[in-house]
């Protein structure tokens, strides 16, 4: 599975998407409001500068009708209204006063007064009537029409921005039309709605990619699993819940695959068990039946009764092993634990199989806690197996290691084929190539040994001895504090 950059719960993604849906339109609308306003103000400043240049260019010819017409037309193109008038130069005032016999100081004072009056008129633009009365005054037609309305002054204030103008021989006021607020609001609303739409589209796309599409794939995988197809690919998502469901579904598929494989193996083993048991029972039953018929009809030699007894004993052992194995296979053995002297246990097992078996045990008493009957069955099975395949000697060694008791069953037989060692303790397996199968047995004895040993928490191991023969080692855990013998 590829590494995800971020994995969050679905609730966190929804909260993040809601915050984005709120923040994106707000940020977009705010940025648009500011940018549109800045552009409108820049346009207004540009029109104002152009209007000032136009007035300065045509101000000298202001009293002429042609100049006023040109100025009016150019200001109208800039959406600028004007209330301006020409201010007479100071030297002409001084010359007029001198012609009347006034002193130079009086002429200078009069010039200053005229200039101050022109500036005052420039600062009072809402009363351009006085300017229109003079021969050098000029008012644009739009401004004159607005002032003639009943609420002209209020309209002029709300619709235009006033900019006083005092430049050389020209003084007055320029009225620049305010930018349209409706256009600014419309642009802001349009960008806000566009940002909201983009945020919603992004949210839907990501929701489909991280939630809806993975859930659809999970549903399809669940249907394939229900149909028996267990090879499903893991589903990755940045939504934690969806990723967890995908991992759980993939794990379930792996578990089902393993369970089905175990079931097939168990079915195959069961079929093999039935066929093998049927084969192993058929041969002694056939021999037993023949021997009994010979005895019944008084034919044959005197060995018929012995042969019938041997086959009956073999059948009893086969049925007993089968019953024990089936009980261990479907139910754990119920152990009755008690303190056991392992040396006595080993001698009892050896005497049961063959008194000629050599038992080597330590002089000091070694105590093991376990089920007497179960452990005796383990040793008897191993000793019987060794006795059936040994040439002349079977030996049982008992030793106490660190926190364990060890039983070693050794024989001087042909040994075990190395290829058979890994599966020696499997049910129904018999190493027929090196261990003579004519001695009987259904191949369940060693499987029973392994299960009974595992019930005590121990283990069993088989190997070949360097000098020849086989060695079976049983290890059982020993309690740290040895219990008293009963």
Image: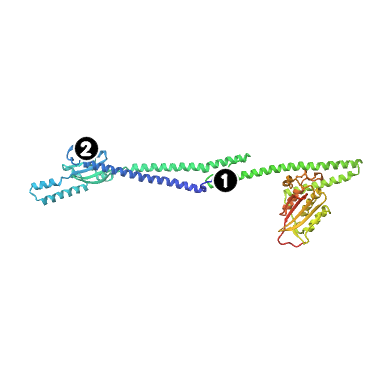
Q: Depth check: give the residue in front, 323 or 83.
A: 323
Q: Depth check: give the residue in front, 199 or 288.
A: 288
Residue 467 is left or right of residue 204, and the answer is right
Residue 333 is left or right of residue 53, and the answer is right
Quadrant of the rendering where the C terminus is positioned: bottom right
The answer to whether residue 357 is above or below residue 267 is below
- Identify the residue at the far right of this view: 298
Q: Is residue 312 visible?
A: yes
**Which class describes the residues within 10 Å of circle 1: few (<14), some (14-19), or many (20+)?**
some
Q: Depth check: give the residue in front, 466 or 221.
A: 466
Q: Looking at the image, which residue is at 89% across and 45% down?
A: 305
Residue 67 is left or right of residue 350, and the answer is left
| Rendered image: mark on residue 481 | none
Q: Depth check: give the residue in front, 322 or 76.
A: 322
Residue 92 is left or right of residue 282, and the answer is left
Mark 2 → mark 1, Cα distance in angstroms: 80 Å
Sequence order check: which comes first, mark 2 or mark 1? 2
The answer to which quarter of the image holds residue 32 is: top left
Q: Is residue 126 visible?
A: no
Secondary structure at badge 1 equals helix
- Identify the residue at the far left of this view: 101
Callout 2 touching callout 1 (CB < 8 Å): no
The answer to which quarter of the image holds residue 288 is: top right
Give the labeled residue for mark 2.
Answer: 70
- Identify the residue at the far front of this view: 467
| Rendered image: mark on residue 245 | 1
Residue 33: x %, y % from top left? 36, 45
Residue 345: x %, y % from top left? 79, 57
Quadrant of the rendering where the N terminus is positioned: top right
Report the number of discs: 2
């Amino acid at each position: 599975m590829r590494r995800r950059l971020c994995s969050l719960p679905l609730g966190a993604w929804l909260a993040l998407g809601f915050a984005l849906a709120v923040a994106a339109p707000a940020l977009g609308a705010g940025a648009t409001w500011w940018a549109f306003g800045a552009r409108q103000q820049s346009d207004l400043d540009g029109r104002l500068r152009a209007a000032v240049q136009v007035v300065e260019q045509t101000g000298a010819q202001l009293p002429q009708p042609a100049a006023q017409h040109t100025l009016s037309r150019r200001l109208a193109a800039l959406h600028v209204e004007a209330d301006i008038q020409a201010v007479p130069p100071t030297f002409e005032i001084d010359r007029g006063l001198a012609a009347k016999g006034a002193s130079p100081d009086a002429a200078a004072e009069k010039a200053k007064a005229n200039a101050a009056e022109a500036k005052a008129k420039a600062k009072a633009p809402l009363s351009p009537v006085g300017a229109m009365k003079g021969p050098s005054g000029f008012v644009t037609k739009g401004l004159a029409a607005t002032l003639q309305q009943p609420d002209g002054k209020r309209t002029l204030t709300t619709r235009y921005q006033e900019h006083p103008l005092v430049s050389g021989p020209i003084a007055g006021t320029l009225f620049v039309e305010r930018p349209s607020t409706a256009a600014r609001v419309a642009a802001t609303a349009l960008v806000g709605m566009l940002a909201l739409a983009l945020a919603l589209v992004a949210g839907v796309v990501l929701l489909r990619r991280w939630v809806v599409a993975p859930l659809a794939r999970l549903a399809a995988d669940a249907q394939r699993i229900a149909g028996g197809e267990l090879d499903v690919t893991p589903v990755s998502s940045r939504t934690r819940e969806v990723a967890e469901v995908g991992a759980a579904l993939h794990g379930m598929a792996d578990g089902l695959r393993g369970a089905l494989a175990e079931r097939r193996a168990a079915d195959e083993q069961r079929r093999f068990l039935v066929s093998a048991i049927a084969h192993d029972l058929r041969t002694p039953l056939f021999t037993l039946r023949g021997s009994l018929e010979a005895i019944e009809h008084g034919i044959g030699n005197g060995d018929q009764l012995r042969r019938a007894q041997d086959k009956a004993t073999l059948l009893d052992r086969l049925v007993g092993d089968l019953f024990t194995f089936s009980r261990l296979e479907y139910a754990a053995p119920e152990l009755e634990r008690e303190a056991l002297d392992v040396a006595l246990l080993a001698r009892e097992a050896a005497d049961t199989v063959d008194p000629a078996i050599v038992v080597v045990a330590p002089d000091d008493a070694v105590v093991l806690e376990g089920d007497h009957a179960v452990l005796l069955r383990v040793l008897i099975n191993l000793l019987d197996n060794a006795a059936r395949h040994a040439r002349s000697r079977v030996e049982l060694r008992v030793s106490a290691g660190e926190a364990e008791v060890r039983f070693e069953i050794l024989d001087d037989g042909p040994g075990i084929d190395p290829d058979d060692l890994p599966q020696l303790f499997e049910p129904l397996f018999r190493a027929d190539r090196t261990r003579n199968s004519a001695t009987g047995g259904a191949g369940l004895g060693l499987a029973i040994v392994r299960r009974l040993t595992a019930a005590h928490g121990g283990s069993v191991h088989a190997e070949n001895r360097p000098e020849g023969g086989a060695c079976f080692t049983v290890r059982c855990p020993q309690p740290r504090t040895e219990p008293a013998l009963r």
